[in-house]
Amino acid sequence: MAKPMRRDAARNRDRLLHEAAGVFTEQGLAGSLEEIARRAGVSIGTLYNHFPTRDALIDALLPPRLAAVDEFAAQAEAEPDAWTAFIGFIDNLLAQLTADRGLLEAFIGDHPAAVQMAEACQRGMAHLSKVLDRARRAGAIRADASDDDIVNLLWALSLLGENAGMSAWQRSLHFVLDGLRADRRTNDSVEMGR
């Protein structure tokens, strides 16, 4: 049976997690552990007492944040229209990823993953695949758009958002979605009077 943590130790742990969230959001998962400790007002030794490795800190921090993707998937599943479900999932996911560089790196696998984080990311990728499969089966998305293609587009749009701001990725997303939609040529022909 684990001994309960002292109040000051629990407070330090909570501060470390809070500051790690900020540092990883700003700097990515390779963010400075020393900076996390400094912002939390504790020594680096205290950080290592609570989290012996970077991956232990990541395991404690990211899975609950990745759980937001579960909610996006539930919203997509509840949406009756496959295309609307797809664009809603992508829009929610991009908003989350561009706001949090650490989460973006975790999702695309740009960090040697801690065990729990890797499991949470696999779950997130499974959600994305499920939403894409539904859109393909409904004929809403181009059949030749692979899961990897979509992940690469998400990565590119996320980087655009990180560097140019939210409005840049939102504007560009419209062009990307137009290119992914299966019936785009049909709609263009109707609009052009063909």
Image (cartoon, rainbow, N blue to C red):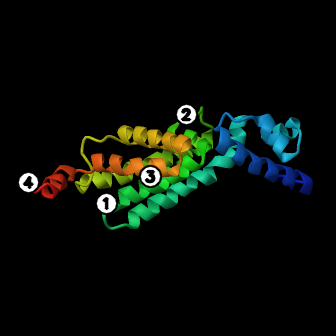
Residue 107 visible? The answer is: no
Disc 3 marks which residue? 170
Query: Residue beneath label 1, please?
Result: 82
Foreground tag (1 vs 3)? 3
> Which corner quadrant holds the C terminus?
bottom left
Judged from the image, the secondary structure of the residue bearing numbered disc 2 is: loop
Tag in front: 2 or 4: 4
Residue at image coords 52%, 43%: 164
Please give left or right for residue 11 compared with residue 143 in the image.
Answer: right
Q: CA distance from mark 3 to mark 4?
A: 30 Å
- The x, y position of residue 135, in whole percent, is 30, 54
Question: Is there a contact, CB below 8 Å, between mark 3 and mark 4?
Answer: no
- Secondary structure at badge 1 equals helix
Amino acid residing under circle 4: Arg
Which residue is labeled 2 in the image? 110
| Element type at mark 3 | helix
Drawn side of residue 106 relative to residue 174, left or right: right
For residue 53, what is the image quadrant?
top right
